Image (cartoon, rainbow, N blue to C red):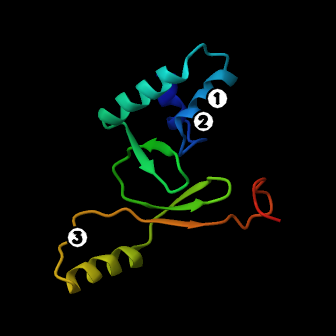
Amino acid sequence: MKILELFQSGNHRHLSAEDVYKLLLQEDLDIGLATVYRVLTQFEQAGLLARQHFETGKSVFELNEGEHHDHLVCVQCGKVVEFFDEEIERRQKMIAKDRGFELHDHALSLYGSCTKTDCENRRK
């Protein structure tokens, strides 16, 4: 349950299996990386966590809170920021309708680079 608590704490919204493993090691918990993968997969199958596959090359997990949102992903440091924009949602539905589609679901991930000066991986 400690793994689920990491996500519920609010300090970490998007974590890879490796991130979870490192955080647990920092808390002096004796757990293997394979166990972390197995537990994350079980939580995903149970609907507690959702897995996101970003183009940064590794999957990250987030709490499955049932509310739709989109993502901004930094291609340099991997930071993920959630957002919801009603105008984007409306336009996507209109685009689908105009092309003869009924939109059931979508996933939108925008890729860019952090511009915040405190990002340790930001290009100089």
The picture quadrant where one finds residue 6 is top right
Task: Tell whether 39 sits left or right of 80.
Answer: left
Label 2: how many residues lie within 10 Å, few (<14), some (14-19) or many (20+)?
A: some
| Relative vertical location of residue 53 with respect to residue 101 in this rendering, above or below | above
> Residue 103 bears which disc, if any?
3
What residue sits right under mark 2 in the picture? 19
> Residue 22 bears which disc, if any?
1
Residue at point 61%, 16% (across, down): 29
Mark 3 vs 2: CB contact within 8 A: no
Mark 1 vs 3: CB contact within 8 A: no
Tell which of 17 and 91 is nearer to you: 17
The picture quadrant where one finds residue 99 is bottom left
Looking at the picture, how far across and down is residue 1, in whole percent?
46, 22
Secondary structure of the residue carrying tag 1 is helix
Secondary structure of the residue carrying tag 3 is loop
Q: Amino acid at mark 3?
A: Leu
Residue at point 30%, 34% (across, down): 45
Q: Amino acid at mark 1?
A: Lys
Outermost residue on the bottom side: it is 98
Residue at point 37%, 62% (across, down): 107
